[in-house]
Amino acid sequence: MIFIKKGTFVMGCTYEQGNECTEQEKPMHQVTVQDFYISNYEVTQLQWKAIMGTNPSYYSNCDQCPVEQVSWYDIQEYLKKLNLQTGKKYRLPTEAEWEYAARGGNQSKNYKYSGSNGIEEVAWYSNNASSNRPVGQTKANELGLFDMSGNVEEWCQDNFRDYPGSKPTLANPENRIVRGGSSGGAATYCRVAYRNSYAPSFRNRNLGFRLAYSP
């Protein structure tokens, strides 16, 4: 786990995102996050199996690949069991925590993707990967976090909400936020500002998560 020091940052459609921003990313706005910890890596299939006893993943022959085909609800069950075993209070990151960490926190260099303006350095996505890859094989970002862009999309804790002052969108407010892009998606989905959301029961082979907790 990496400690992320509290700070204030500009979230959303910032200048380095160019003309790729969607309406859901607008407007850019200031957000303050408190101290938290976040995992260097996406949760792997081996880690999931150790707690749950099964492996739901589509790409299931790769213990060090991210676990996928897990819904937001599935993850809540995993967290309950993990916390019972460890005595910790692990959770999903909030959307703001996720973006702050992906941008590099207080060490941010204002990259378009997490750790670089060159996507090939930091992300497995549709142009360079035919499937998910073992975690931690690309370049880390400024904070030492891997795969915040690409490999699998990552669930966040939050329900979807339009940003303050934005035009209303058609996204379902019951959906849960997803971030980061995946090996099955285009480069634009790997940008640090890109937002997506799914029903909390949704499962997909390009959708996983990473852990966070508060000090």
Image: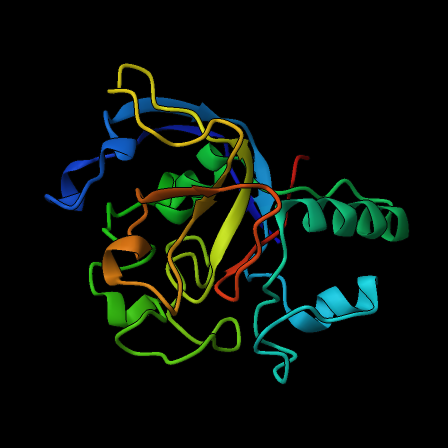
Q: Which of 71 and 86 is in front in this view?
A: 71
Residue 59, picture quadrant: bottom right
Q: Name the residue furthest top.
A: 165
Q: Nearest the camera: 152 or 29?
A: 152
Q: Position of residue 156 (x, y in %)?
A: 54, 41
Residue 69, position in %: x, y? 60, 62
> Residue visible at 34% across and 67% down?
123
Residue at 37 percent of width and 59 percent of height: 149
Q: In this view, does 84 lie to the left or right of 149?
A: right
Relative to 146, is 199 on the left or the right?
Answer: right
> Residue 138 location, x and y as percent?
39, 73
Q: Can residue 12 be seen in this view?
A: no
Q: How many labels does the image show?
A: 0
User: Which residue is outermost to the bottom?
Assistant: 61
42 relative to 145 in the view: left or right:
right
Q: Position of residue 178 (x, y in %)?
A: 46, 45
Q: In which quarter of the image is the N terminus?
A: bottom right
In the rendered view, tell whether residue 64 sits above or below residue 111: below
Instruction: Find residue 24 and report its image quarter.
Output: top left
**Left or right: where 133 falls relative to 26:** right
Q: Is residue 119 above or below residue 74?
A: below
Please identify the quarter of the rendering in which residue 150 is found: bottom left
Camera sees residue 159 = yes
Tell me the quarter of the image containing the C terminus: top right
| Image color mode | rainbow
